[in-house]
Image: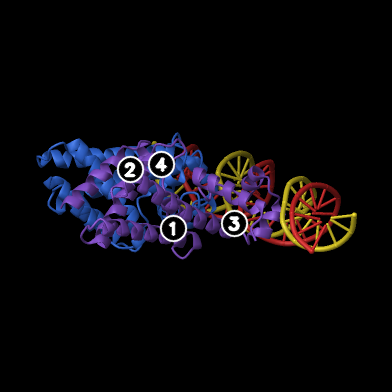
Chain colours: A purple, B blue, C red, D yellow
Amino acid sequence: MPTRARERLLDTAEELFYADGIRAVGLERILSTSGVGRASFYRHFAGKDELVVAVLRRRDERWRQWLDERVSALGGGPLAVFDAIAERFDRADFRGCAFINTMVESADPAGGAHQVAVAHKQALTDYVAGLLRTHGAPRPDETAERFVLLMDGATVTALRERSSAPARRARELASLLLAA
Amino acid sequence: MPTRARERLLDTAEELFYADGIRAVGLERILSTSGVGRASFYRHFAGKDELVVAVLRRRDERWRQWLDERVSALGGGPLAVFDAIAERFDRADFRGCAFINTMVESADPAGGAHQVAVAHKQALTDYVAGLLRTHGAPRPDETAERFVLLMDGATVTALRERSSAPARRARELASLLLAA
DNA sequence: CCAAAACGGTACTGATCGGTTCCGTTTAGA
DNA sequence: TCTAAACGGAACCGATCAGTACCGTTTTGG
């Protein structure tokens, strides 16, 4: 039974985690920023780790829902995924992919956060494979893996270049792959 | 005038930073693992930040030197960069690209660590452009950017899949780009 | 051989980490 | 309206963080 405090905690934590990194953000800051009391936090979450997993799970669902909406609005073709992420790259608060960042920060593959991140990429790959299958592309599963590799490459490149150009370069490579 | 203690600090810090992340490794652990006294550390480095930058600078030089050696041994062609990184992906202690990880962990673009990471990617891009130019590839600078995007995409994918397969997929995409 | 530099160990600082507990207030449903 | 749950605030806990100061020992070069 989620309350308003729980939502505020998730909202604040997601924003701070994405902007500064999970390890870099202490509970102190999450509590003072959200205005939630310390005791209330532990009424909703067993600890920071559980908050992290809850934040990532929610972000995973929302992000993939957002992608689906943007892809539909951009024509519905597989290559539209690159147009969609290009929009994200241009935002001032862009800080890469929260799930790649999580895998980097939470090194332990057995940790909950790491596993949510892996699951997110698998769900994304399945989604792209569906787009490819719908458009009659051959070898949709293998091609989807290449598409996600290109999306991830574009994302980490954009984090460094602070530009949406990498998304367009990745799209060209994906287009080349479809034509082959 | 570097001493043995300084080298031990750099060796230990590089290993721990890469394995667990920069923020996750405290000075306490670096000192106990390396066997260097606390005072000795501060005789060599002004603080942890300076150690981090020194570690990254040294790793940048050594990594690019290693890449050049492997590329030469693997034929010297531009596509050999993917064969080289595939070897790294197979190692049990593979934890992605230390410089991508640094950019993720050290969010502040103005920070020293972040800047060393950006410089590393630029140096790598220049190196790949040189390979492409040597082999008569058209548009070597633009193509090098695509190559590095593919290398980074393969690296983060390998971090998740724990396999060298992403390097081979990236190589195929790069090969497609050269043929176009 | 001896002096000076480099060194390892220990004890300390203030700040912050995640986490626990209690208390008084606010909110919302029966 | 009245009760019970949800809440915010604050005082704690032990552990660890980066960083400082002083100690006696080891190493090394002139």
Q: CA distance from mark 4 to mark 1?
A: 19 Å
Q: CA distance from mark 1 to mark 3?
A: 17 Å
- Work out whether residue A156 can be spotted: no
Quadrant in the rendering for residue B164: bottom left
- Give x and y (percent) for residue A85: 37, 44
Q: CA distance from mark 2 to mark 4?
A: 9 Å
Total marks placed: 4
Q: Earlier in the sequence, mark 1 or mark 2?
A: 2
- Give x and y (percent) for residue A73: 37, 45
| Chain letter of the residue beneath label 2 in the structure image | A
Q: Which residue is mark 2?
A: A83
| Horizontal arrangement in the rendering, residue B76 relative to residue A169 (left or right) | left
Q: Earlier in the sequence, mark 3 or mark 2?
A: 3
Q: Which residue is mark 1?
A: A117
Kindly indicate whether the residue at mark 1 contacts the one at mark 4 (C-beta within 8 angstroms). no
| Chain letter of the residue beneath label 3 in the structure image | A
| Chain letter of the residue beneath label 4 in the structure image | A
The structure residue drawn at horizontal position 35% and vertical position 41%, both measured from the top left corner, is: A86
The structure residue drawn at horizontal position 28% and vertical position 45%, both measured from the top left corner, is: B149
Instruction: Residue A88: give its label.
Output: 4
Instruction: Residue B172: give its label.
Output: none
Density class for disc 1 (Cα within 10 Å; few <14, some 14-19, many ≥20) is: many
Q: Secondary structure at mark 2?
A: helix
